[in-house]
Amino acid sequence: MPRTAFPFASKDVSALARALHRDLAARPGTPSHLELLNMLARATGFRNFQHLRADATAAGRLEAPPAPEEPVDHTRVARVARLFDAQGALVRWPGREWQRLLCLWVFWSRLPAGLEMAEREVNERLSALHRFGDPALLRRELFDRGMVTRRPDGSGYRRIEQRPPVDACALIRWLGRG
């Protein structure tokens, strides 16, 4: 099993020494390796060594450089934006697959996050966002593409949290300006 090195730092060496002295004096004999790790971690403000390790691991993930984003295809975004009216409602269901997918991301973004809704409520929300009168088509497409989940009996729908593609993010921002 490989050993991972974790950084160890103390803002106050004197407080570290006092805490270690107190812990060592309170116990009989020499501490084990794990006990010593826990003492060191507690002396620097962590609950135990596992807490120190979890904090170091999380800090490492946060400091990782972000993945480079792919460029936005502004031509595609502009073409799809023309399918929406001035109020941001979709006028007609597009014939091209890539256009439909971008439109679905707009509908996904307008569904509330973390809220389970009944089918009727989803239909009402989707009906307010388009002009061609087929919320069931939109609801099925959102489910089939993994953008929403539903209970097996169809009684509840919930948006699946995920990061939309960069073109979809650009379209959502564009339509949000109006």
Image: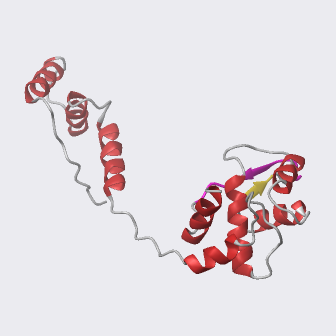
Compare residues 24 and 60 and report the one nearer the observer.
60
- The C terminus, quarter of image: bottom right
Within the image, what quadrant is residue 165 found in?
bottom right
Quarter location, residue 33: top left
Q: What's the magenta region?
A: 153-162
Is residue 158 one of those drawn in magenta?
Answer: yes
Q: Position of residue 131 (x, y in %)?
A: 86, 63
Q: Residue at x 45, y 70 (%)?
A: 69
In this view, the residue in front, 134 or 115, is 134
Position of residue 19 measured from the top left corner of the image (x, y, whole percent): 16, 23
Task: State the residue in front, 66 or 28.
Answer: 66
Q: Main secondary structure of the magenta part?
A: loop
In the rendered view, tell whether residue 115 sits above or below residue 79: above
* 125 lies left or right of 86: right
Query: In the picture provided, is 167 more to the left or to the right than 115?
Result: left
Viewer-closest of 164 and 60: 164
Q: Quadrant of residue 78?
A: bottom right
Q: Position of residue 93 (x, y in %)?
A: 82, 73
Q: Is residue 147 visible?
A: no
Residue 18 left/right relative to 142: left
Q: Residue at x 87, y 66 (%)?
A: 137
Based on the picture, tell me whether residue 10 belongs to the magenta stretch. Answer: no
Residue 48 percent coordinates (x, y): 31, 33
41 displayed left or right of 148:
left
The residue at 28%/60% (across/down) is 2
